[in-house]
């Protein structure tokens, strides 16, 4: 029912802003390196150093967006991840113009068939089911395949009494699939409810950005909701809200910290601390590591 394939994430182009860092070495020779320019504090960081920091700015703590390959690489134990439903592909249910071309373009860019990769693996020894959204794939919008993969992953976790973690990063429902995309909100929410009724843990990790129909469904239904620092969390955009209500919203509105202060998330956790935090939560909820008691 749930086909699995062993998956070793492949290196893909990094999502940093390109630039050049020019300096003189100890022999007075000019050295030119590619670098990351932090969009928040404008600090230049060599790409190799930025990767060591898990794509987090060492100066201001800005968390850059990352693809599904790197998310899995820094979260699950090496060699432990097996992907579910890797061949599931999108159709064009409402014959939206050029939709198939956009999907194929995203598939080539991201190295996956759809905007989410699901599967099972271990996190610091604890077995878990994971879903990782990739915002490079049509802004990780939720269409029928994304909804189906999330639902199947949650059902697998429920059946096998495993915790489920979904890393959300999405612009919301996929407009190119019309009403079919909106149906995924109810379908994924139902799967979360059944997982909860079975007494199993669901952790939602909110990454940048998480908005629209994803926020209005599974992303905000976690037993525990964790946000990475500084990410955007909301339903409608800030400008849309301001024009609707005729008022100016706070500067930090819809940031992870603002949302946390107002009770919509349980924790704001830095990327470097996420695997240990997840393992600790598994232990607190009675799960045991693989081979443990």
Image (cartoon, rainbow, N blue to C red):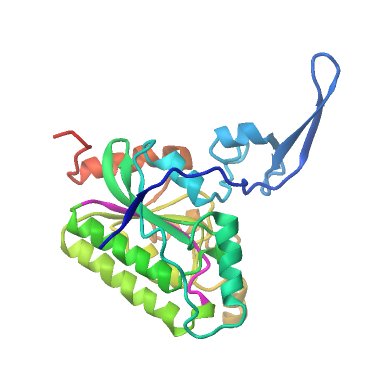
Q: Judge left or right: residue 64 versus residue 43.
A: left
- Specify whether residue 281 is painted magenta: no
Q: Position of residue 57 (x, y in %)?
A: 61, 39
- Specify whether residue 172 is painted magenta: yes
Residue 152 in view in this figure = yes
Q: Nearer the viewer, residue 177 or 218?
A: 177
Which quadrant of the figure has residue 206?
A: bottom left
Q: Quadrant of the N terminus?
A: bottom left
Q: Residue furthest left?
A: 293
Which quadrant of the figure has residue 201?
A: bottom left
All told, the count of numbered labels is: 0
Q: Judge left or right: residue 122 versus residue 64.
A: left
Q: Residue at x 42, y 81 (%)?
A: 180
Q: Residue at x 41, y 69 (%)?
A: 145
Residue stretch rendered in magenta on the structure: 162-174
Q: Quadrant of the C terminus?
A: top left
Q: Nearer the viewer, residue 80 or 221?
A: 80
Residue 166 in view in this figure = no
Q: Residue furthest top?
A: 27
Task: Examine the rendered structure and indicate whether residue 54 appears above or below residue 244.
Answer: above
Q: Position of residue 287 (x, y in %)?
A: 19, 43
Task: Examine the rendered structure and indicate whether residue 205 appears above or below residue 287.
Answer: below
Q: Judge left or right: residue 269 versus residue 19.
A: left
Q: Residue at x 53, y 38 (%)?
A: 54
Q: Position of residue 60 (x, y in %)?
A: 61, 40
Q: Position of residue 7 (x, y in %)?
A: 41, 46
């Amino acid at each position: 029912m749930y086909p699995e394939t062993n998956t070793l994430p492949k290196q893909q182009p990094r999502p940093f802003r390109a630039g050049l860092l020019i300096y003189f070495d100890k022999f007075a020779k000019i050295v030119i390196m590619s670098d990351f320019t932090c969009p928040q504090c404008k600090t230049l960081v060599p790409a190799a150093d930025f990767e060591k920091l898990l794509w987090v700015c060492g100066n201001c703590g800005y968390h850059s967006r990352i693809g599904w390959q790197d998310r899995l690489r820094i979260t699950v134990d090496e060699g432990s991840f097996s992907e579910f439903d890797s061949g599931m592909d999108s159709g064009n249910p409402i014959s939206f113009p050029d939709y198939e071309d956009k999907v194929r373009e995203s598939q080539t860019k991201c190295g996956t068939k759809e905007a989410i990769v699901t599967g099972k693996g271990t996190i610091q020894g604890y077995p878990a089911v994971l879903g990782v959204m990739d915002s490079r794939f049509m802004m990780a919008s939720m269409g029928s395949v994304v909804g189906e993969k999330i639902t199947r992953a949650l059902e697998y976790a429920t059946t096998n009494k495993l915790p489920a973690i979904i890393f959300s990063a999405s612009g919301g429902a996929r407009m190119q699939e019309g009403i079919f995309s909106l149906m995924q909100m109810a379908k994924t929410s139902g799967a979360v409810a059944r997982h909860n009724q079975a007494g199993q843990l669901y952790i939602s990790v909110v990454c940048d950005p998480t908005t629209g129909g994803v926020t209005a469904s599974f992303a905000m239904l976690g037993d525990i909701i964790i946000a990475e620092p500084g990410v955007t969390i909301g339903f409608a955009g800030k400008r849309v809200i301001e024009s609707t209500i005729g008022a100016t919203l706070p500067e930090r509105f819809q940031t992870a910290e603002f949302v946390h202060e107002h009770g919509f998330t349980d924790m704001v956790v830095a990327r470097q601390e996420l695997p240990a935090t997840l393992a600790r939560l598994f232990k607190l909820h009675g799960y045991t590591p693989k081979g443990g008691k």
